[in-house]
Image (spheres, rainbow, N blue to C red):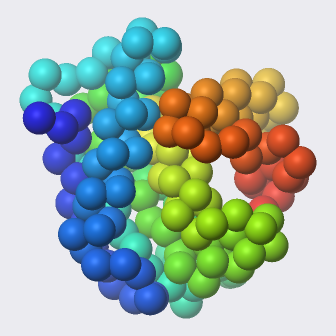
Amino acid sequence: MTALDIQISVEEGDWPSEDELQGLSTRILDVTVAFLIAEEKQPFPDDPPELSLVFTDDQSIREINAEWRNQDKPTNVLSFPAFPVTPGNMPGPMLGDIIVAYETLEREAAEMEKPFEEHLTHLLVHGFLHLFGYDHIEDDEAERMEGLETRILARLGLSDPYGDQPRIDSLEQ
């Protein structure tokens, strides 16, 4: 049994099939949930909470970014928690939405000389942590969140995404 009820929606962009995205997302986020439970003592519901993953393009995410963040430009990933939650508190039955933009992800992966799937993995982990109340606005918050991302990605066999790269908030377009 998986830890989450993941609903996939491919709206725009040259994404892999929904089945491929479902398998990849389930693997990534099951590892993330297991890490948060074991290492951060994050409580988690017995019944898998629902998570919506939307795979779209730059135009769509730009419109969402303009409406919700007053930033009229595309970005790589947006997260919208269904309910307010802070790290260490029990999440509700619906975690929220993570929206990823294909062109921005593809461009950033190329700029960082990383495989597309590796950067997608990082953005899904990053977006998922936002749903649990982690943030990177303040330096101490960023350090904590980036540390968690790095440790989770290591469990997935991936290198530190911040080793030689700028912080993720500086990558957002």
Tell me residue 122's x, y (percent): 58, 51
Q: Nearer the viewer, residue 51 or 21?
A: 21
- Say which residue appears at 22% left-offset and 53% top-offset: 6
Q: Nearer the viewer, residue 51 or 84?
A: 51
Q: Is residue 97 left or right of residue 126?
A: left
Q: Is residue 114 left or right of residue 38?
A: right
Q: Is residue 117 left or right of residue 12?
A: right
Tell me residue 168's x, y (percent): 74, 53
Q: How many marks?
A: 0
Quick one: which residue is furthest to the front in this view?
157
Q: Nearer the viewer, residue 164 or 57?
A: 164
Residue 160: image quadrant is: top right
- Say which residue appears at 89% left-offset and 48% top-offset: 164
* Vertical relation: 156 (above or below) 6: above
The reply to whether residue 59 is in sight is yes
The reply to whether residue 76 is in sight is no
Tell me residue 156's x, y (percent): 50, 39
- Say which residue appears at 58% left-offset and 58% top-offset: 118
* Vertical relation: 37 (above or below) 17: above
* Vertical relation: 94 (above or below) 172: above
Q: Nearer the viewer, residue 36 or 96?
A: 36
* Vertical relation: 57 (above or below) 96: below
Residue 134: image quadrant is: top right
Query: The N terminus lies in which quarter of the figure?
Result: top left
Q: Is residue 109 left or right of residue 31?
A: right
Query: The C terminus lies in which quarter of the figure?
Result: bottom right
Tell me residue 155's x, y (percent): 52, 31
- Say which residue appears at 61% left-offset and 43% top-offset: 158
